Structure formats: structure tokens, C-alpha cells
Image (cartoon, rainbow, N blue to C red):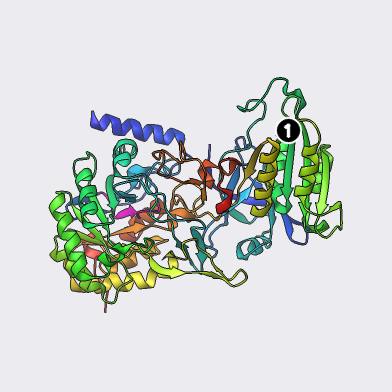
């Protein structure tokens, strides 16, 4: 059940030049599923005005950990947070990556199912919970992690500890294979197997991932990022264009709505739904 | 029967929510709660705090976070005759102490609202004010007629000013003659109290206000968003999919205060102040310049319980300053 709380910062540590981990106390925390997010702001401030959406990276005993990248005014201010400072937090919000075993495309003999997680930079965030919580019966996982360079692979150590099979690519070749993470995906999908692809990262990457998965005839789910004001489905600001004209949106009549709302209908979408031309 | 429904709704609300702040009457020393009730356009409100259209969905989105029974009124997202898909994203961008939006009036349409959304709101002991708009005078009138026959609607708020729509109706709110024409036509289409929401994107807002009054408006609400735009210097593109949008938030409060004050002096109609209200102090400022009630807008996005916190702050201000009624404060600015 979502709630709105003012809570204490437990820690805030820089892990890479542009990346931080923020621990937040949250008593009575209910379950958070892989892919869900929270809306966060620094208590008492009206500049920045709006809360910012952050994916939940880890569930701690006493709260949650957010892994964030410094991109603008809001996240720059967040780097100054110290233990004991207060933040306002709204969540958990949104849907989550589906369990492939119970999903409609599950086939006979799911024991061979392989989940390919494709992450670009900060797009790694939803996959830690998937790695921990999502080791669904019999499925195997592989992480394809891409970034600009070795300083753009936040949380890599955490995934190594989980014992997940990891393949890395960087655009500058400073670590892993030089090139794009989508090249790794093409290679992975060329092997025989029963796959499902979960992806999170820049829009250009997601578009290419969706295209590759579609070509290979593999189910693909993407977690989208969009500017949000409320995170509660009220402002309708975080719209994304969808292809299907039927059964979309929140109670809208068919054939009249071409948008879904990322905060409420998502952030995780079947890649086939998204109108990638409009992205 | 009706009151039973309301009670059970309150209970189910409470059981679902995070701890609610106690009712105003409880735990507040001396003399009981101040009388915050106010009559606007013939609608009796238990207090002057409303939620602004487009910032509170259809009420249900906020129900997990606050007790809707405590609000003076809920003003729902603007409705058109048919459902609307809205504008291409991005639809939102934050600006200095404010935000620009170009949602494009996405809504479920008046019929689906009456069928699916209104029954939920009717369960609460708050007034439901329905914001609406049209592409043409005929459409305005048709929407008003549908709402006129819907049970549970306390009043209408007519949007003649949203800057998001690219088609010609922008001129309704920017031209006194067009304002008069469309408000007159709607006036004949409904018996419900009629509030006209004014655009700030005009040369002389008092001329539009007078036209709305002459056409039969019962009250005026102001201001709608200020037309604006945001540009990304790196990509050399507009930050909104629609290029232009409407500015709201604390940044527009001074503009809104001035316009409420101007209209208060020029037109004898109850006014509802809107524009960047984040705190009770902001709300009081609007009352001082002539607003009988206020609407909380962008603040709902920042803080889901903002409207309730503002309501509590107003009550505290009344108590502290020994103010006996809203009327006493309205337009009492010392100049």
C-alpha cells in the first residue's frame, strides 16, 4: 500500500563520480516489487518544486536504498544529504516486471527460461531487486550491463556478489567489450534457448532492445523513465504513446486514447505496446 | 440512507489510509473551531479550500492520502463532450519555482465521468464542482446539459482560458464579446451555479470579468495558468512536446494576487483565488485581496495532503487573529 512519509536519511555515499547510494529509513515497509519507484523531495524545500521519481534499488532491514545519478539541480542537492536529514517519500508506486513463470507467454517446461536483463548506466536500478527477489523457480538470469565507460557501471559489485552471469560493454572500451549493450543482446539471443528480455536505460537503447527482441520473437518488457509531477496518476504529465488502441489507460473508452501514463500504467510496459516511432 | 453511505465511506477511507490528521475541532484549545463556512455562487462550502481542476484528478487518486470529507470542494479535471487524448509528451517541465504543463486537457469525457467517476465522489461529504470546456459554443452547452441532469454536482466551473489547446477556442477567454457569448449560452443551458475561470493572458482582466458577470456568471475563479515556454539550449529544442504550455506554482502568485485585487475592485461577484498557493499564508493573502475561497493546485503534486495542511493553517490564522468569518477577511487589504 502506497503511503506518504517524512523519513530520515541513513547514509548517502558516493560510489562513482556521478553516482550515489542513498539509504532511507522506512519503518513498516511493505513489499516492494522489482521495477517500482518512489517520489522523493528534500523536506521543506519548494525549489526544486516537484518531487523526483527514483527506482528502488535495495530493500534494507530498516528502509530502502536508492541508487541515483547526479543529472540536475535536484540530484545535485541530494548529494549534500547527511545522516539524520529528512526527506519526503511517496510510494511504492507503479507496477513491476512480471514473473515470467506466471505470465501469459510462459510455455511448457519453464525450467529452461532465461531472463536477460539489459541495463544501460543508471538503468541498472530495477534489476537488483529482480536479481534478489526474482530468482523465480527454475529461471536463470543473465545481466547485460552497458555504459559510456568504467565509471558508468554503478552497482556492478553488488551484482557480482549475487552470482549472476554478467556481460559488460562500454562505449570507450575501458572495461568489457567495446561497443553497445545491444550488441551483447544480439549475441545472447543468437544462442538457442527460451528467453525473456527485461530492459531499463536510455530511450535510444530501449528502442533498439525492443527491435532486437521483436525480430528474435522474444518477449520483452521495458521500464520507462518520464518527467513526472505527481507520480499518482493525477496530473497525466508522464504520458507515453502506445500502439494499441484498445483497453488502454485508466477507464478510457477504446479507440480514443493513444497514451498511457508511466506512473500508473507503468513504469514497466510490454515493449510491443509502445509506439517506438514516437519515442 | 444518504448519510449512512457517507459514514461508511469515511470509515473505509480511514481504514485504508495512513494516519489522518485529527479533525479541526479536536485538541484545539478554547472557543471551538472558527467558522470557515462560505457561500459561493449559492454553493454552501464548509470551508474555503478547494482543489484546482487538473491537479486533483477525479478525487479518487488522492483518496489514499487524505480525507476528502474535509475539503470545501473538489474541482475535478476539465471535461469535454468526448474523451480527449491530450498532447504529445514531454508534457511537464519544471521551471524556477514553478512548472509548465501541456497536458492538452486529456480527460475521460463527460459521459464516462458521470457513469464511472462521479459515483465515487458522491460518497463524500464535500461539494463536487465540475470543470468543463468545449471546442465550440454548442459543445460547451451540451456538456453543461449533461452535467445539469447528473445527480451530485454542486456547481460548474467553466474553463474559457486554457492555453493548451491550439484550436480557436483560446479567444473565448481573451475577448470580452466572445466571453459574453459563450457564458450567456451556457447560462441558458444549466440551472447549476456557474463559475467562470478566467485567463491571465489578457490585456485587461476586468473587461473579461465584467463580460462574464453580464452574461450571468455566479462567481469567478482566477487565475488559470500563464502561457509560457521552455527551451533546451543543448538540444536546441523546446522542452515540451506541444512547444508551449501553462505556467503554475509559486512563481505565478504575485500575478494572481494582482488580478484578483483588480477584479475585486471592478466587479461585484464572489471570487475564487488560484495561483501558486502552497501555504495557509498564501491562501490568506488571496482572501485579503478579495477572494472568498481559494483553490490549491500545483501544491497537490508536491504534497498530496497540501490542501488539508492549508485548511488547518487557515483555521489557526482565524483563531490567532480572532477572525469570526471568511467574510470579515475578504478584500480587507489595508491600502
Residue at x 77%, y 43% (from the top left corner): A186
Quarter of the image where the N terminus of chain B is located: top left
Residue B114: image location, x then y, percent: 29, 39
Q: Is residue A169 left or right of residue A274?
A: right
- Front residue (pair B26, A19): A19
Q: Is residue B23 left or right of residue B145?
A: right
Which residue lies under the disc numbered 1? A195
Quarter of the image where the C terminus of chain B is located: bottom left
Residue B46: image location, x then y, percent: 26, 49
- Front residue (pair A230, A119): A119
Which residues are drawn in magenta?
Answer: B46-55
Residue at x 71%, y 33% (from the top left corner): A133
Residue B83: image location, x then y, percent: 35, 46
User: Is residue B49 rendered magenta in the image?
Assistant: yes
Residue at x 41%, y 61% (from the top left corner): B279
Q: How many marks?
A: 1
Residue B37 visible in the picture: no
Amino acid at each position: 500500500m502506497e503511503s506518504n512519509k517524512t523519513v530520515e536519511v541513513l547514509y548517502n555515499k558516493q560510489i562513482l563520480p556521478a553516482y550515489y547510494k542513498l539509504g532511507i529509513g522506512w519503518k513498516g515497509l511493505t513489499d516492494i516489487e522489482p521495477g517500482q519507484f518512489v517520489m522523493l523531495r528534500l523536506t521543506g524545500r519548494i525549489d526544486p518544486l516537484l518531487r523526483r521519481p527514483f527506482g528502488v534499488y535495495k530493500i534494507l532491514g530498516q528502509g530502502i536504498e536508492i541508487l541515483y545519478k547526479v543529472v540536475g539541480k535536484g540530484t545535485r542537492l541530494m548529494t549534500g544529504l547527511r545522516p539524520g536529514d529528512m526527506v519526503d517519500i511517496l510510494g511504492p508506486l507503479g507496477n513491476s516486471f512480471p514473473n515470467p513463470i506466471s505470465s501469459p507467454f510462459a510455455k511448457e517446461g519453464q525450467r529452461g527460461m532465461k531472463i536477460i536483463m539489459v541495463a544501460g548506466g543508471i538503468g541498472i536500478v530495477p534489476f537488483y531487486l529482480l536479481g534478489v527477489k526474482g530468482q523465480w523457480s527454475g529461471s536463470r538470469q543473465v545481466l547485460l550491463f552497458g555504459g559510456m565507460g568504467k565509471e558508468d557501471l554503478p552497482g556492478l559489485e553488488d551484482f557480482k556478489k549475487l552470482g549472476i552471469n554478467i556481460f559488460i560493454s562500454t562505449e570507450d572500451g575501458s572495461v568489457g567489450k567495446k561497443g553497445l549493450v545491444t550488441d551483447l543482446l544480439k549475441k545472447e539471443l543468437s544462442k538457442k534457448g527460451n528467453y525473456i528480455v527485461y530492459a531499463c536505460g536510455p530511450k535510444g537503447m530501449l528502442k533498439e532492445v525492443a527491435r532486437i527482441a521483436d525480430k528474435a520473437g522474444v518477449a520483452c518488457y521495458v521500464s520507462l523513465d518520464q518527467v513526472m509531477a505527481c507520480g499518482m496518476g493525477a496530473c497525466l504529465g508522464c504520458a507515453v504513446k502506445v500502439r494499441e488502441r484498445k483497453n488502454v489507460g485508466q477507464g478510457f473508452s477504446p479507440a480514443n486514447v493513444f497514451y498511457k501514463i508511466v506512473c500508473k500504467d507503468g513504469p514497466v510496459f510490454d515493449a510491443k505496446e509502445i509506439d517506438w516511432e514516437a519515442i | 440512507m444518504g448519510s449512512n453511505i457517507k459514514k461508511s465511506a469515511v470509515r473505509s477511507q480511514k481504514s485504508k489510509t495512513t494516519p489522518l490528521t485529527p479533525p479541526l475541532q479536536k485538541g484545539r484549545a478554547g472557543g471551538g473551531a472558527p467558522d470557515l463556512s462560505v457561500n459561493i455562487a449559492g454553493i454552501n462550502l464548509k470551508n474555503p479550500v478547494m482543489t484546482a481542476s487538473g491537479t486533483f484528478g477525479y478525487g479518487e487518486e488522492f483518496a489514499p492520502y487524505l480525507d476528502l470529507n474535509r475539503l470545501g470542494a473538489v474541482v475535478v479535471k476539465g471535461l469535454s463532450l468526448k474523451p480527449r487524448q491530450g498532447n504529445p509528451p514531454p508534457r511537464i517541465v519544471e521551471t524556477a519555482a514553478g512548472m509548465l504543463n501541456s497536458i492538452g486537457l486529456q480527460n475521460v469525457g463527460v459521459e464516462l465521468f458521470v457513469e464511472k467517476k462521479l459515483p465515487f465522489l458522491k460518497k463524500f461529504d464535500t461539494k463536487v464542482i465540475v470543470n468543463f470546456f468545449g471546442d465550440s459554443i454548442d459543445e460547451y452547452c451540451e456538456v453543461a446539459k449533461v452535467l445539469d441532469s447528473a445527480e451530485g454536482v454542486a456547481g460548474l466551473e467553466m474553463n474559457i482560458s486554457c492555453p493548451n489547446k491550439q484550436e480557436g477556442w483560446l479567444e473565448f477567454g481573451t475577448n470580452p464579446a466572445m466571453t459574453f457569448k459563450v457564458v450567456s449560452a451556457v447560462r441558458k443551458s444549466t440551472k447549476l451555479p456557474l463559475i467562470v475561470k478566467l485567463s491571465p493572458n489578457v490585456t485587461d482582466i476586468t473587461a473579461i470579468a465584467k463580460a462574464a458577470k453580464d452574461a450571468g456568471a455566479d462567481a469567478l475563479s482566477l487565475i488559470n495558468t500563464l502561457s509560457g515556454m521552455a527551451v533546451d539550449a543543448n538540444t536546441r529544442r523546446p522542452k515540451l512536446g506541444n512547444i508551449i504550455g501553462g505556467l503554475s506554482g509559486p512563481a505565478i502568485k504575485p500575478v494572481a494576487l494582482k488580478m484578483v485585487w483588480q477584479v475585486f475592485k471592478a466587479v461585484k461577484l464572489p471570487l475564487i483565488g488560484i495561483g501558486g498557493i502552497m501555504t495557509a499564508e498564501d491562501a490568506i493573502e488571496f482572501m485579503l485581496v478579495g477572494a472568498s475561497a481559494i483553490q490549491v493546485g500545483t501544491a497537490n503534486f508536491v504534497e498530496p495532503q497540501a490542501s488539508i495542511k492549508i485548511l488547518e493553517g487557515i483555521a489557526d490564522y482565524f483563531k490567532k487573529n480572532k477572525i469570526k468569518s471568511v467574510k470579515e477577511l475578504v478584500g480587507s487589504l489595508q491600502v
